[in-house]
Image (cartoon, rainbow, N blue to C red):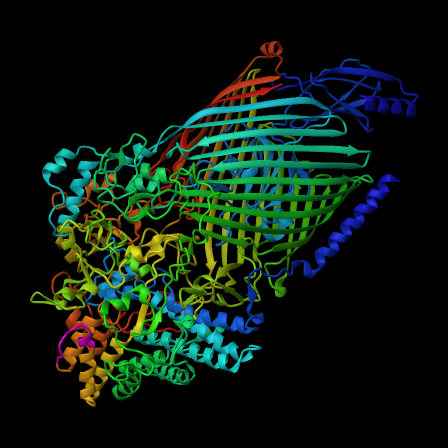
């Protein structure tokens, strides 16, 4: 009898398990801390989180490799070498320095990938924003304008760097991705113009401090002006940049004016200053360490430009208090010579270049020059890893907070001046614009012409990532880069290196066509 | 005894007409004459029986014409007719080839003679007494078709195990089942001393009972338990010894290094770095390898107590292993303490309950960064220049930065002026790792009930729980090792704690029935499992301490200096049903069929469930009437099996949906340093995701030859994996940061396996047994998606831009891939002669540069000239064990080897131009040494001699290693009687005595996550041990 009880108990038990085994609900577990795409974008807060994600690609310091665009941009220019710890340190950037090495396998692939992440996140938000319950009309209009501004920003980077890129304005299925073909550059430019034109009226003229970093009307107009300039639509460029710039030397309707002290522009204590039109904010507050690879929203590039093995000789040293860095993008003698004519220093020199060898000679500091590849003795100063800017928490190396100013007023002044000269329209205004830029640093007027504008742009914007594009745009890249004085020259091939190769990974199983010459 | 008496009485009453007689006697082994306790003795045709006592003695009352059946595990069963005798002494013969053994097959056991699948067994005899700290190590070289490669010689490291090759690009680790409990990793809790046997299910037909997780093979572990009707037994095992490094890598000394540095810069047209006077004064310099390697002690102790009455058994054991590592043994260690209890209890006639409880604590050092070319003591020792002294002196003035480290003797550690990046003075590095360790607490338990309500019917329900806590603790002092490795900001204390709970519940019902010569067995079962887990970590920065001993999370710090994080595991659930039908006719024609249905939460509703069938056939030829009686071939069984199994182990949860996740790279900064948390998709959806599927066909035979002395097992198999889960290499312009999974790839494994066993006693005193195994496996990737010939990516090394492996159709998984050098150009003439249509193929080459093969013949050297250079995974593996015994002496030698593979030497950091050179570089090409085939040294390396991954880095990976040699002596009986022990044996054991290999790195055994790529692997040690086994 006893065993019958046990037996029937067991059979009931077994049956219970069989029943639970069969039920689908046992297997339908729900994710923790994540949502399925179909359920998302159902509140205004979720729409805003989607907007943040659309911005996020602006500020990607590490993806496939270190991804701050200043690295490849400066490496490609005659302002800097790639440097680093050796000839294969950051080989993707080394290939920008010596474009003979630039191949589909060896190129800064993040320039491509990160911008397309931005495109995807912008498109995803734009496709969902109509259906977000509870989102106010004003917010919806502003988010839409911001997403369009961002999409234009990403596509402008892509078209300038790569020329021939696929153009997406909606989220793509996997099948659509594989079927996608490259658009003509003109089509991409047309989309950029359309996005910016549509965005401008819905963007705020100014934003409260708490919203610093979000797109404004001035930023969109400045970007559109830059786009027109690159398209050589000089009249359009001059017209819209005039609205951004206002009266040369004065304060524009967006509140922009040149700062009195050039050095203040790059000071992290002076973020979002009146000269900054579009600024990518970096934070030192997140305690990043190496586990956070791919997530850094701090400025890793700062540390990368610092000298290796750096130490001040004592606390009374007059040398700058740097954290030891990785010696990337040392300043070329070429730029130094351009800034120092006959012993006369351009006033911006001391905010741009640090002559470390002279400080070593003066016994103020030491650094491991033999571990610095392509060392020139000159280091970049605008983003230098000064200890005062290190975070008090987290890994010092990974928590610098110097912002990257994408577009600032001196740039838009000079761009407008260039557009005016090129279109040969209001030369008086052009003169006033270049004079204002020079006067700010105490330099006298020079006649406005392309040669002087070119020189002024190089002095004013050195190491800010625009030099290489200026050279390409002006058709000067080969003559300048292949004839650098002192130190090794670079190799720019006309008809090929104006754009980068399409990364090797993008050609597998896709309809992408490689750029000519690669 | 009471019970037996009862039986006897019962018997006596029911058969009053039969004359009764009390038989007594002793049962001994025919092998060594030792008495056998616990031998079961049954009166044939009845259920009455008894067992021998501790002295092998029995006494049993039976009818005077009864037949007694003596049976004992590991011995041949004997039947003896009483014929009125009162004393019957019996010699039992050990089963030479184990046909009577029982083999664990998953949810049940099968007699070895009836096994129809391809199953290898490893018994505790081949595990005991070896210095094995982990279960998986016990498999190395012991069975065919199982490749075991150490991922590191560091104490307690997990080896890489492949059963019949790489089955999947993703996860090829076998499924481990311990006492019926499916383990998801974390096997280090098992005390090797507790293992009774290990069975490896190799063919899909056998594995099908574990369905969706069995594609990579199944390892079934059975732990020891007490034996019924056995008096208390106490065993003590001890091993104590030392480990030493076997060999060092030949590097240049200080003088050679300086000469080569000069050579390198002068080849680039620069002035020499070192003057002749400096070179002559340099001497040998620092041998960093000498600094990091030391003798490391090893010890293990294990006590077990076991026994049983006729209705209960018990087994309790405690084990302790303390192993130091040969690299910086002052901090490298692995300690393990384990407790195990296993009991069974029989309630009444029909019900048995039992349980297993295990607890293991493990603590090990973790800071050595092994098998990485990016720093850590091994990598630094191989790459640091020999000029830097270990210590520079007690005073360094201002030449050293603040926080440069001082040794205990007050001397500062040398900091290299030449080699930076990740390479640091390894002794100084050690000082930064003192407070770091990992630990785990594992609690494993199961409880079961077995019911046998009627003859042939068994119901079983078993609940298994594994609760694991593990974590990590570290402390970073303020230190300065070099410009790239320093912490000059704040001390950091970090603690990471995780917990994981997995449970499963298995229920089976089995019925066996004999109808004439037909034997049927049907088993049906269900299984459900769920796992959950979570973790927390905390970082405290700037505690007011300077060393790890004083560090504590009790310090009050501002919140900005206290950082915390956490996670919840995504839940995972499985629900399964399975059945097995076994049939044999007269133990001659054998059949087993299995069907399992698995449901997994990893897949969307389109593919919740998968079905995994299999069929196995066996034919025992020698039981046919036509089989001639002969002394040559005693036993022959032919087997054929076919089965389908699945693999979901590599897939994460919720991969079938497009998931919106937040944070990390999706964030952005607004306002005054305010981090905005962004949410977006990371990969597109794939609702059709399903299992990887592996089907395999296996044919083989088991033969016993030469008067039962030689056993031979042969298997041939083909195994095809289809719908392999691959992350679709979605192009970057899709804008996703993660790649979606899809069922795309196919690959095959084909091979054969031979196992040989020989067992013979010569004369009275000399015993010989030998086991050998040999296996060949050919792995071929057959499909990677429409129009896709290879996968992007692959393993990388150093900072080179080309991967060094490629998974491509028609090649083995992860084959080495790169440029082909054809020796160096010995003259400008040779460079000029290397042209296509008059255009130089390598216009920038100089004499002494590599001549690269222009494989596509386009007249230039570029990425298209890369080719397949070899297989990292050995296709051939073999092992051999020989046991010799003479009187009280025993001797064992065990060797194991591989061939057919290559090893990529990634530890040479030739991208750090100032790194130390391998000794071969002394022979580098120069004008004065024009016949060398080692390329010229150059810092700029314009010809990419060192930057291109090429066959220059590859070496033959074949080796044969004498893994274990052991000589033991068992103390004679007469001494035993004096001290009252049942058994006492002392032995010496040498591990890794020698290795035959052409490989010139540390160790040709390179497993781990990048198999066959030597990034400065932690070498295995040569171990000398003295051991003791005592039985009371």
Residue B401 position in % (x across, y down): 25, 44
Which residue corresponds to the image point at 35% horizontal and 65% vertical from the top-left? A110
**B202 or A99: which is nearer to us?**
A99
Please indicate, yes or no, whether residue A510 appears anywhere in the rendered image. no
Quadrant of the frame with the N terminus of chain B? top right
Q: Is residue B955 left or right of residue B825?
A: right
Q: Tally the marks.
A: 0
Whether residue A440 is in magenta: the answer is: yes
Residue extending farthest left: A342
Which residue corresponds to the image point at 24% horizontal and 67% vertical from the top-left? A263
Query: Relative to residue A39, is residue B920 depicted above or below?
Result: above
Query: Relative to residue B267, is residue A298 depicted above or below?
Result: below
Query: Hey, which quadrant is residue B665 in on the image?
Result: bottom left
**A277 or B656: which is nearer to us?**
A277
Q: Most prominent secondary structure in the magenta stretch?
A: loop
Question: In the rendered structure, which segment of residues is drawn in magenta?
Answer: A437-446
């Amino acid at each position: 009898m006893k065993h019958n009880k046990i037996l029937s108990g067991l059979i009931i038990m077994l049956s219970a398990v069989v029943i639970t085994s069969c039920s689908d609900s046992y297997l339908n577990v729900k994710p923790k801390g994540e949502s399925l795409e179909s359920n998302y974008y159902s509140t205004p807060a979720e729409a805003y989180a989607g907007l943040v994600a659309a911005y996020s690609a602006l500020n990607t310091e590490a993806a496939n490799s270190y991804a701050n665009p200043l690295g490849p941009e400066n490496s490609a220019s005659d302002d800097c070498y790639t440097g680093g710890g050796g000839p294969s340190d950051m080989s993707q950037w080394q290939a920008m320095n010596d474009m003979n090495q630039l191949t589909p396998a060896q190129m800064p692939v993040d320039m491509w990938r990160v911008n397309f992440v931005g495109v995807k996140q912008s498109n995803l938000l734009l496709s969902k924003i109509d259906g977000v319950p509870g989102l106010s009309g004003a917010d919806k209009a502003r988010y839409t304008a911001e997403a369009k501004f961002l999409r234009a920003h990403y596509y402008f980077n892509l078209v300038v760097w790569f020329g021939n890129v696929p153009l997406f304005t909606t989220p793509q299925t996997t099948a659509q991705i594989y079927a996608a073909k490259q658009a003509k550059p003109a089509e991409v430019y047309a989309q950029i113009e359309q996005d910016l034109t549509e965005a401008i009226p819905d963007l705020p003229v100014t934003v409260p401090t708490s919203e610093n970093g979000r797109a404004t009307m001035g930023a969109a107009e400045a970007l559109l002006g830059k786009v027109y300039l690159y398209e050589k639509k000089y009249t359009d460029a001059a017209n819209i940049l005039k609205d951004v710039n206002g009266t040369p030397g004065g304060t524009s309707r967006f509140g922009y004016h040149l700062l009195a002290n050039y050095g203040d522009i790059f000071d992290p204590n002076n973020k979002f200053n009146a000269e900054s039109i579009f600024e990518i904010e970096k934070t030192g507050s997140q305690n990043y360490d190496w586990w956070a690879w791919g997530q850094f929203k701090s400025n890793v590039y700062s540390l990368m430009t610092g000298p290796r093995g750096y130490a001040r000789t004592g606390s009374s040293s007059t040398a700058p208090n740097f954290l030891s860095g990785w010696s990337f993008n040392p300043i070329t003698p070429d730029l130094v010579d351009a800034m120092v004519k006959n012993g006369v220093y351009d006033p911006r020199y001391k905010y741009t270049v640090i002559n470390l060898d002279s400080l070593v000679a003066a016994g103020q500091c030491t650094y491991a020059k033999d571990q610095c590849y392509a060392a020139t003795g000159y280091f970049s100063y605008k983003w230098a890893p000064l200890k005062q800017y290190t975070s008090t928490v987290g890994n010092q190396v990974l928590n610098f907070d110097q912002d990257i100013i994408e577009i600032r007023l001196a740039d838009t002044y000079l761009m407008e001046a260039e557009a005016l000269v090129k279109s040969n329209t209001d030369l008086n205004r052009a003169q006033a614009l270049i004079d204002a830029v020079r006067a700010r640093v105490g330099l006298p007027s020079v006649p406005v012409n392309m040669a002087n504008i070119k020189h002024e742009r190089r002095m004013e914007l050195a190491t800010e990532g625009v030099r290489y594009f200026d050279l390409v745009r002006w058709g000067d890249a080969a003559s300048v880069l292949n004839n650098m004085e002192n130190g090794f020259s670079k190799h720019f091939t006309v008809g090929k290196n104006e754009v980068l190769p399409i990364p090797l990974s993008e050609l597998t199983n896709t309809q992408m066509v490689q750029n000519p010459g690669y | 005894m009471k019970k037996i008496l009862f039986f006897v009485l019962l018997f006596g009453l029911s058969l009053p007409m039969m004359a009764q007689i009390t038989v007594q006697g002793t049962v001994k082994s025919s092998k060594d004459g030792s008495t056998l306790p616990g031998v079961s003795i049954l009166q044939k045709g009845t259920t009455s029986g008894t067992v021998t006592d501790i002295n092998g003695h029995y006494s049993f009352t039976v009818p005077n014409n009864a037949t007694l059946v003596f049976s004992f595990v590991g011995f041949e069963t004997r039947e003896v007719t009483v014929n009125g005798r009162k004393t019957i002494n019996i010699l039992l013969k050990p089963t030479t080839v184990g046909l009577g053994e029982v083999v664990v097959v998953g949810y049940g056991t099968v007699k070895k003679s009836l096994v129809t699948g391809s199953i290898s067994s490893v018994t505790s005899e081949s595990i005991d007494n070896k210095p094995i700290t982990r279960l998986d190590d016990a498999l190395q070289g012991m069975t065919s078709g199982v490749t075991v490669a150490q991922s590191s010689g560091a104490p307690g490291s997990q080896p890489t195990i492949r059963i019949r090759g790489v089955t999947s690009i993703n996860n090829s680790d076998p499924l481990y089942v311990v006492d019926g409990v499916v383990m998801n990793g974390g096997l280090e809790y098992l005390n090797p001393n507790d293992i009774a046997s290990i069975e490896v299910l190799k063919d899909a037909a056998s594995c099908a009972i574990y369905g969706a997780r069995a594609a990579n093979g199944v390892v079934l572990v059975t732990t020891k338990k007490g034996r019924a009707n056995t008096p208390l037994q106490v065993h003590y095992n001890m091993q104590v010894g030392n480990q030493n490094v076997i060999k060092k890598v030949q590097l240049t000394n200080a003088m050679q290094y300086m000469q080569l540095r000069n050579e390198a810069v002068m080849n680039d047209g620069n002035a020499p770095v070192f003057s002749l006077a400096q070179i002559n004064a340099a001497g040998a310099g620092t041998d960093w390898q000498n600094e990091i390697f030391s003798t490391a002690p090893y010890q293990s102790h294990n006590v077990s107590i076991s026994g049983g009455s006729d209705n209960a058994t018990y087994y309790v054991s405690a084990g302790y292993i303390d192993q130091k590592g040969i690299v910086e043994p002052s901090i490298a260690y692995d300690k393990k303490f384990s407790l195990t209890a296993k009991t069974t209890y029989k309630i009444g006639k029909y019900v048995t309950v039992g349980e297993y409880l295990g607890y293991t604590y493990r603590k090990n050092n973790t800071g050595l960064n092994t098998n990485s070319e990016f720093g850590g003591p091994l990598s630094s020792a191989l790459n640091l220049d020999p000029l830097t002294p270990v210590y520079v002196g007690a005073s360094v003035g201002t030449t050293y930065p603040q926080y440069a480290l001082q040794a205990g003797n007050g001397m500062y550690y040398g900091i290299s002026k030449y080699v930076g990046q990740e390479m640091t003075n390894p002794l100084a590095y050690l000082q930064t790792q003192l407070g770091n360790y990992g630990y785990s607490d594992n609690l494993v338990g199961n409880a079961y009930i077995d019911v046998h309500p009627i003859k042939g019917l068994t119901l079983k329900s078993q609940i298994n729980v594994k609760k694991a806590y593990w974590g990590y603790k570290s402390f970073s002092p303020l230190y300065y090792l070099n410009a790239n490795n320093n912490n000059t900001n704040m001390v950091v204390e970090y603690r990471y704690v995780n917990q994981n709970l997995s449970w499963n519940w298995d229920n089976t019902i089995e019925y066996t029935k004999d109808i004439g010569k037909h034997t049927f067995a049907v088993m049906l079962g269900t299984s459900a499992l769920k796992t959950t887990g979570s973790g927390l970590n905390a970082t405290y920065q700037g505690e007011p301490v300077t060393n790890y001993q004083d560090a504590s999370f009790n310090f009050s710090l501002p919140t900005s200096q206290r950082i915390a994080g956490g996670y919840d595991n995504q839940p995972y659930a499985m629900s399964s049903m399975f059945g097995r039908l076994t049939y044999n006719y007269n133990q001659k024609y054998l059949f087993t069929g299995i069907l399992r249905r698995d449901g997994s939460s990893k897949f969307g509703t389109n593919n919740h469930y998968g079905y995994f069938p299999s069929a196995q056939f066996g034919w025992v030829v020698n039981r046919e009437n036509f089989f001639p009686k002969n002394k040559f071939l005693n036993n022959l069984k032919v087997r054929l099996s076919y089965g389908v199994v699945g693999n979901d182990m590599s897939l994460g949860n919720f991969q079938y949906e497009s998931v919106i996740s937040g944070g990390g790279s999706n964030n952005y900064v607004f306002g005054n340093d305010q981090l905005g948390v962004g949410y977006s998709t990371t990969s597109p959806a794939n609702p059709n995701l399903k299992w990887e599927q592996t089907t395999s066909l296996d044919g083989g035979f088991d033969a016993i030859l030469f008067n039962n002395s030689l056993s031979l097992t042969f298997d041939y198999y083909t195994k095809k994996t289809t719908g392999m889960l691959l992350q679709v290499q979605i192009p970057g312009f899709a804008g996703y940061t993660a790649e979606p999974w899809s069922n795309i790839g196919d690959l095959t494994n084909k091979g054969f396996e031979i196992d040989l066993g020989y067992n013979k006693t010569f004369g009275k005193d000399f015993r010989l047994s030998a086991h050998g195994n040999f296996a060949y496996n050919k792995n071929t990737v057959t499909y990677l998606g429409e129009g896709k010939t290879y996968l992007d990516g692959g393993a990388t090394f150093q900072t080179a831009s080309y991967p060094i492996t490629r998974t491509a159709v028609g090649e083995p998984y992860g084959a080495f891939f790169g440029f082909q050098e054809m020796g160096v150009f010995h003259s400008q003439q040779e460079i000029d002669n290397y042209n296509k249509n008059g255009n130089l193929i390598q216009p920038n080459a100089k004499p002494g540069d590599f001549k690269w093969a222009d494989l596509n013949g386009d007249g230039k050297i570029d990425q298209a000239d890369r080719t397949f250079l070899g297989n990292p995974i050995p296709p051939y593996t073999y092992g051999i064990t020989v046991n010799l015994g003479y009187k009280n002496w025993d001797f064992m030698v065990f060797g194991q080897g591989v061939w057919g593979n290559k090893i990529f030497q990634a530890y040479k950091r030739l991208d750090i131009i100032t790194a130390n050179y391998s000794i071969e570089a002394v022979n580098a090409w120069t004008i004065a040494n024009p016949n060398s085939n080692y390329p010229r040294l150059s810092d700029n390396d314009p010809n990419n001699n060192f930057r291109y991954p090429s066959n220059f880095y590859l070496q033959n990976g074949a080796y044969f290693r004498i893994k274990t040699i052991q000589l033991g002596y068992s103390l004679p009986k007469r001494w035993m009687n004096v001290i009252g022990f049942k058994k006492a044996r002392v032995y010496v054991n040498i591990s890794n005595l020698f290795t035959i290999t052409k490989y010139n790195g540390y160790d040709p055994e390179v497993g781990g996550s990048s198999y066959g790529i030597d990034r400065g692997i932690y070498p295995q040690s040569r171990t000398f041990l003295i051991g003791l086994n005592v039985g009371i």
